[in-house]
Image (cartoon, grey):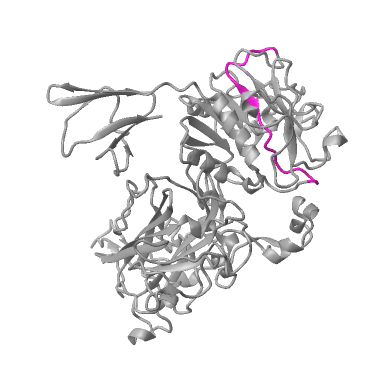
Amino acid sequence: MNRLLCFTGCLAIAGGCALTVAQVYDITTFDPASKGPWAYRGKTTLVVPKVAKGSITLDGAASAAEYGGFAGIEVVPGLGDQGAGNARPGAWILDFPEDRVWDGPEDSGFTYWLAHDDDYLYVGVHVKDDVVVSDNPNAAFWNDDSIEIVVDALNDRFDNNTDNSKDAFGGHCYVNYQGRFSAWDDAAGQISGESWATGVNWKYGPNEDIFGFGKAVAGGWQMETRFHKRLFEDPARGNKLKDGYRMGFNIGLDDDDQQGPSAGGWRTFDLEVQYFWANRERLQGYTADLVASLTPEAIAGKWYLFDGSVTPGVVNSTGRLAHGGTGEILFAYDTPKRGRILFVTATTDGDNAPINADPALIALLQARGYTVTVFAAGGSTPESLRTAAQGQDVVLISETIGSTSVVDPAGSATGVFSLKDVDVPVISFEAYMFDNADWVERTPDGSNDFIHWGNSGRTDLADPAIQDGRDSLFIRKPTHPIAAGLPEGPVQVYNVLYSLTFGLPSADADVVASIQPDGSYPTIFVYDKGDRLVDGSIAPNKRIGFFLGQNAVPSCDWALDYADLTDAARTLLFNTIEYCLPAATPPTLAIARSGANVVITYAGGVLQSAAALAGAPWQDEPGIASGAAIQPAGAGKFYRVRQ
């Protein structure tokens, strides 16, 4: 660690320029119970791209190109002066050891990448570090320069300690800067300890389940490691790390600057600082033992949220190693879809944004292959929403928005849906804008009548029959493309008892699903282009009310949680999106010479290139417009158009 205080700026002899100081965040002032981006879903939910099998080489040179376009995530303990005269934390920092020190980003900070192929999950890191060292045995790599990884493989979000919970799949491990593994005894060639995948007879090595490679470089170190997917897949549960599977994941860094006792230094521990990308708000007390003690009714109603069994929203030091403290990663689909979606959410500003189920829903759509543009309705104008909708294949409106944030004039209870006349399909989870869009009957003053639209499970509904929480809806039209693959009758869409959105549309609309078995209270309804809305106007394109609900007092008074959705719910969502998308255009590709240049003309998909037809990764070519002339340079390339 370089003990050098750096100043930037200038000093004028007479007036003019004042001395400015480049601030470094004092990590000893960090409150481990504080909440920053590490604590919330909106900033700790990611998509893991799918890459070709064998396309990643463990050489320490991780990059977005090699990792399927994954934009490296930077994790730095402290951030500089933000304009208020104080530096601030940029990651969650452990309050140990007492004499911890951090001298700035060049002392310690890292960027990481994630990707997966048919067999492995890959993790690559580039670390800034002024002293690179590893001089402890594997089990004590937390004292050295290493990364820490915590995996909640079954995504149970338990409040446990992965150092002693003996997870059968996933768990807690360290990988040092050289790529060596904490739970492997190098000398004995066998597993050491019980903190990692105790249900799998795994091995470490170049051709085994786990392997890593790292090296010191100028200014720090670089390392890549891979984990066989069987370390996270429980045969009894049938979970597979593919096609949108969601898994708890956290990554942190340990920094040893040779100032501790092993090197005769001045500090009490080898460990200089430990910090993590995620330490989410969790349900303290939500353990495997608690869940095992609950009745099915208590689980379905989430009684533990209200009877004092758990404490919600907790962030502290123990959370960094708990399932509940991990962030979440969703694995990209093997066969991606294509389409442009405008996702309208409440807000994108601040550490806690987006909220509720939106971060995971956005990630799910991205994992499916859609291009998702996120639009913040809060504080927007009608014109800005209309502008954002241009060029999109479908607009999806979240239940998190305020219903009057998408009307014209903005904020008016009697305003008109801002996209009413826009020729783009719209899917809405938000029942309380159905009236403004004239999908259902209005009230004169714009107040909610809880008769023609609303969400079930709440006592202010006019009909007591739907004031309870539900886990199922009723498919009424199984022949409709939105219901494809699902039977007529009850279909479970929630893992718990929750709220269903409903609206009473005009006779032109198709009712695909309803809350009640007799078809009353439509919870998925569809206006096709040209259908007549309730006010007599004509739908300029598809308009769809979708069942995803929201807080409902008193039956289900909690925010919509992606974890509560079943596979059938996701099927309905994907079917609804696909129903809205334009018919796919068969891809075309032509390459011709034009003097010394080459002209590439293509349509119906994304242009990609590769150095070879087999073994080399295909990369998008966003810089090559169809019909553009390019000058050949370097080695030859192969091109394709991917839908």
Q: Quadrant of the C terminus?
A: top left
Instruction: Residue at 50% x, 60% y: name it.
Output: 231
Q: Is residue 67 magenta?
A: no
Residue stretch in magenta: 536-555
Q: Main secondary structure of the magenta part?
A: loop
Instruction: Residue at 54% x, 18% y: name it.
Output: 423
Question: Image check: 19 left or right of 38?
Answer: left
Q: Quadrant of the N terminus?
A: bottom left
Quadrant of the rendered image containing residue 630: top left
Front position in the image: 596 or 567: 567
Location of residue 491 in the rendering, given as x and y in whole percent from the top left corner? 72, 36
The correct choice, above or below, for 318 with respect to 442 in the image is below
Location of residue 118 in the rendering, given as x and y in whole percent from the top left corner? 43, 48
The correct choice, above or below, for 48 with respect to 250 in the image is above
Location of residue 124 in the rendering, given as x and y in whole percent from the top left corner? 37, 57
The correct choice, above or below, for 589 with respect to 401 in the image is above
Front position in the image: 533 or 205: 205
Front position in the image: 354 or 637: 637
The answer to whether residue 576 of the structure is visible from this angle is yes
